[in-house]
Amino acid sequence: MVGTSASGRPPDVLLIALDCVRADLFDLELERPGAMPFLRELRREVLDFSGAVSPSSWTIPGHASLFTGLYPWDHGAHYRNGPILTQNPETLAECLGRAGYATAFYSANAYVQPSTGLTRGFDVSSWGGGREFFLRFLGIDKATCPNLGGPALVWLPAVQGEAAPSPLREFSMNTFTRVPAAWDGLNRVGGRVLGTYARQMPEICSWIVPEMDAWLGQQPADKPVFAFVNLFEAHEPYLADCGAPVTARRWLSYARSGQDPVRWVSGQWSPSSSEVESLRSCYLASLRTIDRRIAEIVRTFSRHRSWPGTLFVLTSDHGQAFLELDTLYHRLRVDEPITRIPLWVRPPGGRPSSVRTDGWVSLIDVPRTIAQYVGRSTFGDAGSRSLLEPEDDTPARTVYSMTDGLPPQEVPNVSPERLKFLNRLEVAAYRGGEKAVAGESGSSRAYRAVRPLRSVRPDELPVTEAPGTVEAARAALELAAARIASQPFHGSVERRIAGWGY
């Protein structure tokens, strides 16, 4: 049974979601000496869940599950129903706010903002967009709405103070970020001309820590706080340096590489092996930048709050694929590089040495784990569990991940074969040593599931008999299809076309 802090109040909570960080590459980079020194040291104090699975393959449904403790078919914030979290599910911020917490939200992903319903319950919220990264030479030091560098969220309700969508602006932003070498060159030249090239250049949304610092300084010492941070460095597209100097030869090689997700989706771009290697190299460099950012966040938090008395959770909304299983980036499949994520929990008081647990867990478990400190024994899905309570693996627990596909209106002129590959409602079930995937076409397949994830091609290890896991995947798919059919659609498919560009 968990308790309160030494001060007699519930513990402070710091929750960090790393966009697009997958479990295997995160672990491999952690083990490389000198690559991620802060997180390597912090790992000694945490519960490390090597069987963590994201409930979704992309940002909005993944964060909605993290905040509600529900699977996507229950909270409804996905493409099949319109990617908006409605007023119905209770959020973790609402729960903690009612319990007396001060709550704050800082997001570097423009999808994670008020228009998508994901800030509901937070006292204050600031969000920007990953494309701030591509205008680093301007020295942006405050939060921006999605008009600067965010996706064209024109299929969402308007936010007060947000300018009307500009097709020309969005076309230019989408086009240049699909050829990021152009922006990278602009940053290098413009930054040197303006004298800003070295000014917080590695960071996407560098305003996050100063704004959190100011907010923490305003909170009474006897009032518990809940701070949420989304970091975007590991999301495509990537700049050449990703926070580290590169040689001219390395930059020229990078400049010749493509990164365009839209052209890949439409089948107009097949990355070469050298392009994939360039993407992967940039991705690994981004993890090293993330290590420095988390160190800064924790140091800032510790200046205002007792770090030993803080409940800390570090996780990701989904992973990132580099054609290991014929999928690039994320969103469209429930393959292991996309569904398997890091999940660390550091309870108040910490732990003398790291503990790695191999049971299957999900992002839906995070809200229940945190809410128990304010007297909540349940939260969200009835099948969720507290990550701080002993695991009962009899019978074997099953967790799920869903992909909502890609509607044909979003990829006009794509071939029927390509659309069949892209637009699939699928649910993966993880149980024991098995993984099964059920699709709405009636197909199902089963694989060996490895914990911890060390190979990026585990789906190449099929199993012939997994009846219980296959049945669980099919049952979850039937439930998802029924819930989708019964829930109203939020938004317009036609207007969503403009909003899908990264």
Image (cartoon, helix red, strand yellow):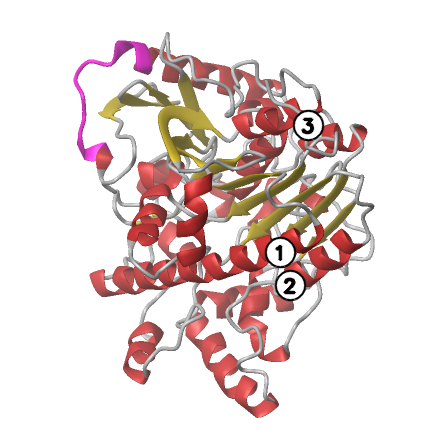
- Crowding at dot 2, Cα within 10 Å, few <14 / some 14-19 / many 20+, comes out as few
Which residue ends up furthest to the bottom in the rendered image?
Answer: 193
Q: Which residues are magenta?
A: 459-469
* Residue 420, horizontal then vertical, whole percent: 35, 36
Query: Which circle's residue, 2 or 3, is located before the other in the chain?
Result: 3
Residue nearer the viewer, 43 or 7? 7
Q: Is residue 250 left or right of residue 185?
A: left
Q: Name the image quarter holding residue 248.
A: bottom left
Estimate the spatial distance between the alpha carbons at disc 1 and disc 2, rounded to whole Å. Answer: 8 Å
Work out whether 24 lies above or below 482. Answer: below
Amino acid at circle 1: Ala
Residue nearer the viewer, 425 or 20? 20
Estimate the spatial distance between the alpha carbons at disc 1 and disc 3, rounded to whole Å. Answer: 43 Å
Q: Is residue 92 left or right of residue 388?
A: right
- Crowding at dot 1, Cα within 10 Å, few <14 / some 14-19 / many 20+, comes out as many
Q: Secondary structure at mark 1?
A: loop
Amino acid at circle 3: Thr
The residue at which mark 2 appears reads as 167
Are dots 1 and 2 in contact, CB under 8 Å? yes
Residue at (60, 38) in percent of width and height: 83
Could one spot residue 413 in this view of the protein? no
Residue 152: image tag: 1
Query: Which circle's residue, 1 or 3, is located before the other in the chain?
Result: 3
Estimate the spatial distance between the alpha carbons at disc 2 and disc 3, rounded to whole Å. Answer: 51 Å
The residue at which mark 3 appears reads as 4
Are dots 2 and 3 in contact, CB under 8 Å? no
Where, quadrant-wise, is the N terminus in this rendering? top right
